[in-house]
Image: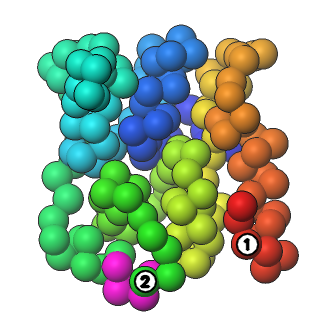
């Protein structure tokens, strides 16, 4: 589990879930949260019904999470490393591109996507994955009711499947 004040990369789903389950404030005060510009835009973009994933202003979120622009060169580095073995959406791609370019030696990524987990496994950095549940527990929050994909149990089972050579389903 990441220690307090560690750098945590958060994807769109993790940003949304942390707000939905009421743990965003404690997370941004406990960890150094970072994300790709695309992930933050995705969280704030209205859907077809006009509803946003996170009902906050960009200015407020920018005070709580450090946002990085991702370059085409960073994306190319990731795509070359993966050799087309994983189909990532744009947010997953940008967050992983950012992860590979981080200067910090110690960081973790919180994102409950099977494609992200598979890509991190192929890149040899699966041990840097963390669950939203695990992060909440480091802050002292216990018994937060989360959907399955945000739990430590779910992440652990997906990691085990990959290490045994099984395909994620």
Picture quadrant where residue 59 is located: top left
Q: Nearer the viewer, residue 27 or 143?
A: 143
Magenta stretch contains residue 82: yes
Q: Is residue 98 above or below residue 33?
A: below
How packed mark 1 is, by other alpha carbons closer than 10 Å (few <14, some 14-19, many 20 or more), is: few
Q: Earlier in the sequence, mark 1 or mark 2?
A: 2
Q: Is residue 32 visible?
A: no
Segment colored magenta: 79-83
Badge 1 element: loop
Picture quadrant where residue 11 is located: top left
Disc number at residue 84?
A: 2
Which residue is drawn at the image coordinates 71% and 16% (left, top)? 144
Q: For the stretch drawn in magenta, what is the main secondary structure?
A: helix
Picture quadrant where residue 148 is located: top right
Disc number at residue 87?
A: none
Q: Nearer the viewer, residue 12 or 135?
A: 12
Residue 155: where, in percent of width, then height? 72, 49
Location of mark 1 (residue): 167
Q: CA distance from mark 1 to mark 2?
A: 16 Å
Residue 80: where, in percent of width, then height? 35, 86
How packed mark 2 is, by other alpha carbons closer than 10 Å (few <14, some 14-19, many 20 or more), is: few
Q: Is residue 91 visible?
A: yes
Residue 149: where, in percent of width, then height? 67, 40
- Visual colour scheme: rainbow
């Amino acid at each position: 589990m990441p220690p307090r004040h560690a750098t945590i990369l958060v994807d769109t789903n993790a940003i949304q879930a942390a707000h939905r389950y009421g743990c965003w404030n404690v997370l941004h005060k406990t960890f150094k949260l970072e994300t790709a510009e695309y992930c933050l835009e995705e969280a704030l973009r209205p859907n077809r019904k006009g509803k946003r994933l996170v009902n906050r202003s960009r200015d407020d979120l920018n005070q709580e999470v450090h946002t990085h622009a991702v370059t085409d060169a960073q994306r190319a580095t990731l795509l070359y490393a993966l050799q087309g073995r994983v189909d990532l959406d744009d947010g997953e791609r940008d967050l992983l591109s950012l992860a590979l370019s981080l200067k910090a030696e110690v960081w973790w990524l919180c994102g409950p996507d099977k494609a992200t987990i598979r890509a991190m496994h192929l890149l040899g950095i699966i041990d840097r994955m963390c669950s939203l549940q695990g992060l909440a527990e480091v802050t002292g929050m216990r018994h937060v009711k989360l959907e399955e994909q945000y739990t430590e149990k779910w992440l652990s089972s997906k990691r085990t499947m990959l290490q045994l050579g099984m395909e994620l389903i």
